[in-house]
Amino acid sequence: MAIPVPVPRENTARGFGQHFGLDPRIAALTLVVDAMLFSGEVVTLGASLPLSVPVGIVLGFITYRAQRHWYRDDRESALIKGLAVGLLTAIPTSLPGVLTLPSGIIGLAKMLRRKKETSPLQIEGRIGG
């Protein structure tokens, strides 16, 4: 009888930026979509409210896929971030801007740090070690 070996989770060494960061492109997209939805709800006095839920679902799915592909989140983290963005977008307020902008800034800092660590000259072995 074989003893099951635990499978290591992806990204086991995760920092603050990985836990709380959103890809900056997703943070910007969320701000734009939320501004369009919120202004539409104000102008139509709430008649466009049924549009917020499907748009929130689509934005949540886009967030999930982008976090997996661009930000290299594991499946669970990307799913949680996607659900959070989708839920906040579906709420008929301008709340997501307050929450996604700081996450996007954290994500941008993480991406810039990752690019600096894997510069082309380091990959070719010309500098540093």
Image (cartoon, grey):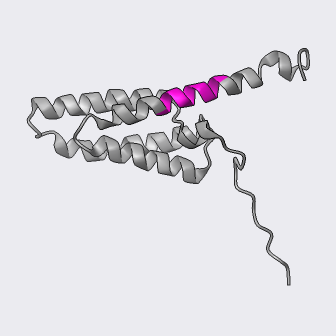
Above-or-below relation of 114 to 95: above
Of residues 82 and 69, which is closer to you in this image? 82
Residue 36 visible: yes
Q: What is the magenta segment's predominant secondary structure?
A: helix
Residue at 33% across / 43% down in the picture? 88
Residue 55 visible: no
108 displayed left or right of 4:
left
Q: Which residues are magenta?
A: 103-112
Above-or-below relation of 2 to 60: below
Work out which quarter of the rendered image holds the N terminus and state it.
bottom right
- Residue 123 pos. (x, y %): 85, 23
Of residues 37 and 95, which is closer to you in this image? 95
Say whether residue 52 is magenta: no
Work out which quarter of the rendered image holds the C terminus and state it.
top right
86 displayed left or right of 38:
right
**Residue lying farthest to the bottom in this orientation:** 1
Tell me the quarter of the picture where residue 94 sits.
top left
- Residue 87 pos. (x, y %): 34, 48
Residue at 45% across / 46% down in the picture? 82
Residue at 70% across / 50% down in the picture? 10
Say whether residue 111 is magenta: yes
Q: How many marks?
A: 0
**Residue lying farthest to the left in this orientation:** 45
Tell me the quarter of the picture where residue 98 sits.
top left
Tell me the quarter of the picture where residue 71 sits.
top right
- Residue 32 pos. (x, y %): 34, 26
